[in-house]
Image (cartoon, grey):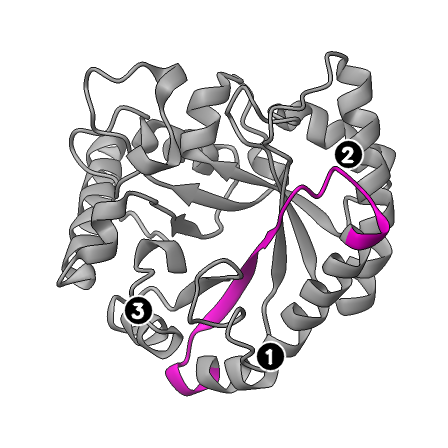
Amino acid sequence: MVSLDFAINHMAAPQLRLAELFALAAKLGAPRVEIRNDISGNAMLDGTPAQTVRELADEHDVTIISINALQQFNVWSDARAEEAKTLAAYCSGSGAKALVLVAENSGNVPDSSATRIANATQALTALSPIMRHYGIIGLVECLGFKTCSLRSKREALVAIDAANGRDVFRLTHDTFHHHLAGEPELFPELTGLVHISGVDERDLAVADMRDSHRLLVGSKDRLDNLGQIVALRRGGYCGPLSFEPFAEELRHLADPAAALQQSMQFITEGLRARAA
């Protein structure tokens, strides 16, 4: 029997208010959610207190696995430190277990691996006492785009170790970004969260794939989500598989629950067939 721990990132149904998202997750039997700080009209941009979010999650019997995200975490500054403290405090107050840490993606990419690692190490060294103080995990996310300043999870792991941060940091494995980066290693034992999404467009070059192409995982998926999930699970990962598509068309679905249910069924049946 294939038992999967699905989760719902708010980007899977950004048209929903937070209470509706929590209700959707509960309805789908996937009572784990990721809330975001980049969806207008919703917590956190609308000023909803963290305690209110916690009470809303409790009301729907869902767990907030992360807040997504502290952007450009590896470009450290006093302003970034204050932002990190604010987000970490919100995590703690809302009951969120982790804060996603996203690498800079502006095209300012250091040529040297040593420089990339040093930048990430500086940030993680400063972030670690913040994570410890608020009792949360930092989920380091490397983006697969060539414009990203930290594409390699191997480099991120070296930075985590240089910052003595294995107690408070884990890697985010994003199936889309992993495919784009072309990094063969998975590091399942050090992965704290998996983001899943698919790309169906057949004639699209990998180098041209963008967030706007990211759909729910289905039979036309080019990213080998099933293969990635199998490899992660065989390596010991048993945490959430969080749906994080970005395609504009998903914002206008009349029935996001049905679409998510279909993708969940495809993944479950696909993994069951591979295990047979």
Q: Residue 117, how many percent across, how many down?
A: 78, 25
Kindly identify which numbered label has been placed on residue 120: 2
Q: Nearer the viewer, residue 11 or 3?
A: 11
* Mark 3: amino acid: Leu
Q: Quadrant of residue 141?
A: top right
Residue labelled with disc 3: 16
Q: Which residue is mark 1?
A: 50
Residue drawn at point x = 63 percent, y = 28 percent? 153
Residue 168 falls left or right of residue 175: right
Q: Residues within 10 Å of mark 3 (few under 14, many from 20)?
A: some
3D distance between C-alphas at marks 2 and 1: 28 Å
Q: What secondary structure is marked by label 1?
A: helix
**CB atoms at circles 2 and 1 under 8 Å apart?**
no
Report x, y in % for residue 206. 36, 17
* Structural crowding at the residue carrying mark 1, measured as other residues with C-alpha within 10 Å and reported as few (<14), some (14–19) or many (≥20): some
Question: Which residue type carries mark 2?
Answer: Ala
Q: Residues within 10 Å of mark 2 (few under 14, many from 20)?
A: many
Find numbered disc 3 in the image and state the secondary structure of the residue it sits on.
Answer: loop
Q: Earlier in the sequence, mark 2 or mark 1?
A: 1
The magenta-colored residue range is: 58-79
* Residue 273 visible to an observer of this rendering: yes
Whether residue 7 is visible: no
Q: Position of residue 21 (x, y in %)?
A: 34, 70
Q: Nearer the viewer, residue 14 or 161?
A: 14
Q: Earlier in the sequence, mark 2 or mark 3?
A: 3
